[in-house]
Image (tube, coloured by chain):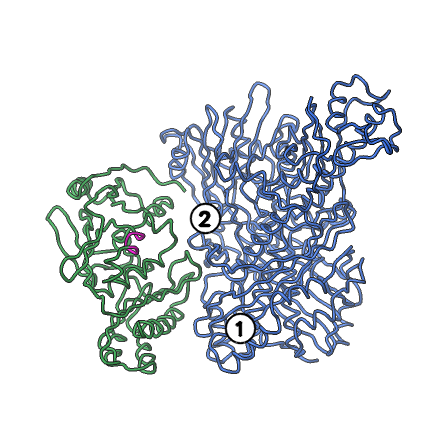
Chain colours: A green, B blue
Amino acid sequence: MIPAAFDYRRPESVDEAVAALAEAGEDAKVLAGGQSLLPMLRLRLAFPELLVDVGRIDEMRGVREEEDALVIGAMTTHHDVMADPLVRTHAGLLAAATETVADPAVRNRGTLGGSLAHADPAADLPAVVLALDGELVATGPRGRRTIPARDFFTDYLQSALNPDEVLVEVRIPKAGNWGFRYEKFHRAAQAWAAVGVAVLVRTDGGRIAEARIGLTNMGPTPVRAAAAEAALAGAEGPEDVARAAQAAAEGTRPSSDLWGSAEYREHMARVLTRRAVLAAAGPA
Amino acid sequence: MTAGPADRTHEREVGRARARKEDAHLVTGQTTWTDNISVPGMLHMAVLRSPMAHARIDRVDVPPALERPGVVAAFSGRDLADGLASMPCVWPVTEDIVMPDHPPVAVDEVRYAGDPVAVVIARDRYAAADALEAVDVDYTPLEPVLDLEAALAEGAPLVHADKGTNRCYVWPLTTGEDWDAVRARADVVVSRRFLQQRLIPNAMEPRAVVVMPIAASGEYTMYSATQIPHIVRVLMAMVTGIPEQKLRVIAPDVGGGFGSKLQVYGEEAVALAVARTLGRPVKWTESRSEGYLATHHGRGQIQDVQVAATRDGKLLGLKVDLLADMGAYLMLITPGTPLLGAFMYPAIYKMDAYAFTCTGVFTTRTPTDAYRGAGRPEATFAIERMMDELAAELGMDPLELRRRNWIRHDEFPYTSIAGLTYDSGDYEAATEKALALFGYEGMRAEQQERVRRGDPVRLGIGISTYTEMCGVAPSRVLRDLRYAAGGWETANVRMLPTGKVEVVTGTSPHGQGHVTCWSQIAADVLGVPFEDVEVVHGDTRAAPQGMDTYGSRSLVVGGTAVHEAAQKVVEKARRIAAHLLEAGEDDLDFAEGVFSVKGSPDARRTIQEIAFEAFSSHDLPDGMEPTIHADHVVDPDNFSYPHGTHLCAVDVDTETGHTRIRSYVCVDDVGRVVNPVIVEGQVHGGLAQGIGQALYEEAVYDADGNLTSGTMADYLVPSAVDLPEFTTERTETPATTNPLGVKGVGEAGTIASTPAVVNAIVDALRPLGVTDVPMPCTPERVWRAIRQARGEEDAAPTDRRPEGTVPTTGQAPAPSEEGLA
């Protein structure tokens, strides 16, 4: 379909972008890679009066190290994220999950920050950044602030970002010595995940010392499988893992839709959690 | 003047893997899609559509739209009603069929979500789309009609209240012995209900139309993304009252159709009417999601099927009772589409009794009509699934059961119980070749090994030994089926003064490669280079007579016409050559484009030289009409019957329900092959579409009748990465019913593959007690089928999908509830 009319600005800096948003108020939207927003405009599910295209802001791109964290510019494309040596070394889970996002065309346009800010629980990267204990850095008229991933996703397509804030970077604690796995279950290569399970595991002497599990599409926001994480502490061997994985759907609120019923999703969360943990804890 | 090199050795073109002439311009973007056409003063149309499945229209207020920027005009259904007749259905399948009125834009009532309500005409497409929201419509909601069985019940809400029923027609076909008698003497009767879910065709190019009027002369040129420019012209003349000779229809580059453009659409009629009223060019192009609502859908049937057999596996009879979802209106061939399958249920098998009925049912959903295979995929699915179910009931290998019942190669020609005479075929040869490529015995051994070791990933093997009817169609058969038109096809072959060739065809390619194939056929007959042939098509002024492209007919009927017309050219040229060489026509040899006198090889004329002689006409035989151009119209005596054997191996993860096609082997017999690359492409695409129905695709509606799977993000079409490597091979048993020996290949892959895949999934799970998985076999449905077979959940429908195409009965009935008699 055809989008409703809107104004368009393409600032060259974060400050300009923030100023443009502040001026426009609630009726402005930030345009990143456009892979989610443009379809919504075309289906007339969104009617912003102004699009602020942050695609030309160089300071929002690229990956760098800052002590114990990786700092990834929000406008770094999926393709650049998954190919980045620092990401592959210190956040292998993010690289692996990003490789499963849609298709090459989408990965060359879509961005990490855009995906997170869109806050779609069916998207892969929100649950991954949640499992990685990432932090999201926003800039607005009142300056910069850092939002932990676990406080960022507030509801379906809703985040803690204020309308006048721009998500500028994502900080990921280095997790190079953790085992990881992203299990994505979808009906076709380009379809959304019916369920996704992002797992990080730290082992110690043949036992799981600590596990972190982010779930995709198991509720209105990405969620941590806290009960399964707790049950996995100290687990040794496949039987322990299978038992702990039974708790993977606890506290989730999956919907029933074209991709699966809530009951099936809960089943899949348990199966995929077991598979992902075993893969993550296995010989790396 | 030019002449072909006389000593050139001419390799036969038919059978060569020629690269397609069409592709260079397609892949470099030098195309003329209808939406690329832009002319000065052109206006753009947008269509306001019903947001409800069923409602009375109390008021349509279009003037507010006129206040919007750029808007030139706006029309309600009532505004347009005077100038437009009801949209046509050309296949009234029974004498007493219920044929409701079908205004191109709804007047009093909307009957599906997407039914047009008003149109806005503006200076650009954006302005037209923006102004739709200014049209004010008051609706009174009416009850939707979604369930085929409930729709037929006493007191059901009616789609067309004035007709007093939702039953469109009942069409029976009974042949051979009495079904009840056969059933009574059978050892085994197996009954199943299959659901053919509604599918949404996905041509790469959406529908589009551009109308250019010449007000002073009352002439109209209409560009349309259609498969059928000739049929559109006839019917648009009838609907709009524009005299046929004043209407030219052009199908420019058309990006696929799969049957969805075998249609005469209301939007085409409205674009003509608006152009007539305003005297200005008008364009309309649908969006993809608009097309999902308003381009016709395919399939949509409930099939109740019974087979009767002896204990040693001899088929005795087949009974088929269909409920076919017409949707809200009868479009071009809506009622006849399921009946194209009526003759194909008995397929390649011999039996004593066949009893078929089809009941057409109106619902408040998008109308259905032809979609790749049109009736034949449904039939093939049912019979091939039943052969597997019967084999399981008998404890017999499904292949062995087929062998015991199929028509042997030495029995052709064979008249099937449905009354079709299959001219040729060799099911044994195709099957043997497929089994060897597939490694059937090894697969069976691995399957058993996995069961033995309790592998949670089971292996299933699916078989489909299909045939189909192509080459539509003998006109007299169409008469007997009450179809309004004929099934002939035309060609005109012209040798130009420079020795080059134009072939004018009545077929209307939209991706098939007719330009390449017709060039190959003509080059062989005329003995001219492939490159010297051009093919003209898809313009009612340049190719004035044709029946267009659908039903795997173009090569069989249209290609034959090209062959015969080219032969006529050679015979006319022979007359001139004999005159010039002062020899009798019978004394001339013709080979590789050269006429030569027998015994005097130096006395020769090339056909190109003759073409120039015909052009100058200085020295022709007395009384000869000065041309060697020739026309030919073919009306086939029979259909053609491709066949083949498809084998599919599927890994089924019993824990998640996920299925993965591990191996797919098909051996198709499409008769003689004109171009193996094109055949290969047709098979690959066909397989993808058939697998799409088996695993991915379904038009899903909610309980109110709104289309839930309304975008390509919600309606899954498999992409290349979702599909396996295909092993494709052929046997070649030439058709005996046309001089080329060809049978058609456009639909074979789609028809054959759906049952092969579902049979494989059920085969994998049969040891667990599963006897069916409804299509599309999503992971959740597979998972639930396993749970139900294990008694872990009720067999009642727990699949909480929204209201489906047809009312779901959840999983299949319990294994052969009739069982051993």
Pinpoint residue B526: horizontal percent, then vertical percent. 74, 34
Residue assigned mark 1: B459
> Is B713 a magenta residue?
no
Left or right, residue B217 beside residue B625: left
Badge 2 marks a residue whose secondary structure is strand
Pinpoint residue B627: horizontal percent, then vertical percent. 77, 24
* Magenta span: A78-83
Pinpoint residue A5: horizontal percent, then vertical percent. 32, 37
Q: Residues within 10 Å of mark 2 (few under 14, many from 20)?
A: few
**Residue that lies at the very extreme toward the top in this rendered image:** B618
Residue assigned mark 2: B140
Pinpoint residue A282: horizontal percent, then vertical percent. 32, 75
Q: Residue A254 or A239: which is nearer the viewer? A: A239
Chain to which mark 1 belongs: B
Q: Residue B739 or B598: which is nearer the viewer? A: B598
Q: Residue A50 or A74: which is nearer the viewer? A: A74
Residue B78 in sight from this viewpoint = no
Left or right, residue B245 beside residue B809: right
Badge 1 marks a residue whose secondary structure is strand
Chain to which mark 2 belongs: B
* Amino acid type assigned to the residue bearing label 1 in the image: Leu
> Is A81 a magenta residue?
yes
Q: Kindly report the secondary structure that dominates the magenta region of the rendered protein.
A: helix
What whole-number distance in Å separates the C-alpha atoms at marks 2 and 1? Answer: 53 Å
Q: N-terminal of the two: label 2 or label 1? A: 2
